[in-house]
Amino acid sequence: MISPELQEFFRLAPIGVLVGAYGTMVGAGGGAVLVPILLILLPHETSATVTAISLAVVFFNAYSGTIAYVRMGRVDYRAGVIFVLAGLPGAVLGARLVHEIPRSLFDLIFGVLLLALGGFLVANPLGSGGGGEHASSAPASDRRILLGSVGSAYIAVLSSLLGIGGGIIHVPFLIRALRIPPHIATGTSHFVLTFMALTATVTHVVMGEFKRGLAQTMYLGVGVMMGAPLGAALSSRLRGSLIVRLLALALCLVGLRLLARMA
Amino acid sequence: MRIILLIVATVSLPLVWGWVVHWLVTRLWPAGRVGPVNRGDDAYPPIPPITYSI
């Protein structure tokens, strides 16, 4: 006779492996695909609990994936530190703003925006003149890093409003606006995501939103920590345009979820 | 009034903070001193061989 806890583990851990592999492969935390799955699998949990579980799992995924990317030498530490420091206050500002914006208006505007952005990236993943295997090996200039610092602050506000880690927005920004090669952008984004997701998770713990969902978080966490190195290894075998297209699918998924919430 | 203040804060605070962080870190950590990726390196590693693409 299998205990309910073991049944729950066998139900959630494989999902964690897939989420960890996909998220790390594209430089995101996996929350964009994990939240809809959790809303189906855990129908009795509040959206706050589901978001808290998702962000904690994103942290485990990002931490494990970052270790793999560090070993591969694919993290731009200097840019990553700047993006983390720029993004942390933005996440707090976004969490404050979420109570001020009418939900229906927010869901409509950002649902359409994310769908449009996702569609654009699927059609034109790397833009003209750079990216992928033709990207320069020189690091981004300080002017582009300034753009990245300001952009990361805004992305952190938006991600906090959306209740996601932000990787699915950050990676295309690093590739398209800063011309960072996709394989460095995914590693650096994961590095940033580790600290952003940790901050969000600690915030949720302090707010008491882990009174329920701790066991599910652990089961998913075991899965993503196994899946993340797999995703990092797969990412090395993918063309940059494919990474961006896979990530664009997650953007479209978040956009659809926002629009569906209005219905 | 409150909405206007919120909009101004949302637009301006990330801009100012992002600039401050960039200014501070680039002064303390000049490009090439430790390297952008690995210690001692000043360039990104080469793109790995591609297996899967569309």
Image (cartoon, coloured by chain):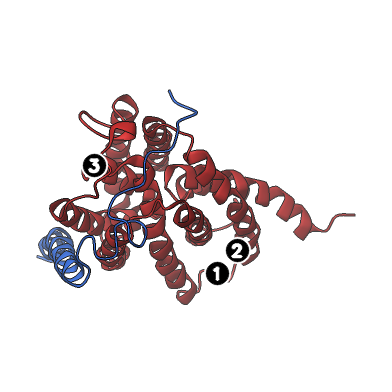
Chain colours: A red, B blue
Q: CA distance from mark 3 to mark 2?
A: 39 Å
Residue A80 location, x and y as percent? 31, 59
Q: Quadrant of residue A211?
A: bottom right
Q: Of circles 3 and 2, which is in front?
A: 3
Q: Quadrant of the C terminus of chain A?
A: top left
Residue A214 location, x and y as percent? 61, 66
Along the viewing direction, whichever of B38 and B15 lies nearer the viewer: B38
**Residue wearing tag 2:** A213
Residue B52 location, x and y as percent? 49, 28
Crowding at label 1, few (<14), some or many (≥20) Cα neighbours within 10 Å? some
Q: Chain of mark 1?
A: A
Q: Chain of mark 2?
A: A
Kindly state the secondary structure of the residue where label 3 is placed. loop
Q: Quadrant of residue A142?
A: bottom left
Residue B50 location, x and y as percent? 45, 31
**From the viewer's perspective, is residue B1 above or below residue A109?**
below
**Residue wearing tag 3:** A179
**Residue wearing tag 1:** A210
Residue type pointed to by label 2? Gly
Q: Of circles 1 and 3, which is in front?
A: 3
Kindly state the secondary structure of the residue where label 2 is placed. loop
Which is nearer the N-term, disc 3 or disc 2?
A: 3
Residue type pointed to by label 3? Arg
Crowding at label 2, few (<14), some or many (≥20) Cα neighbours within 10 Å? some
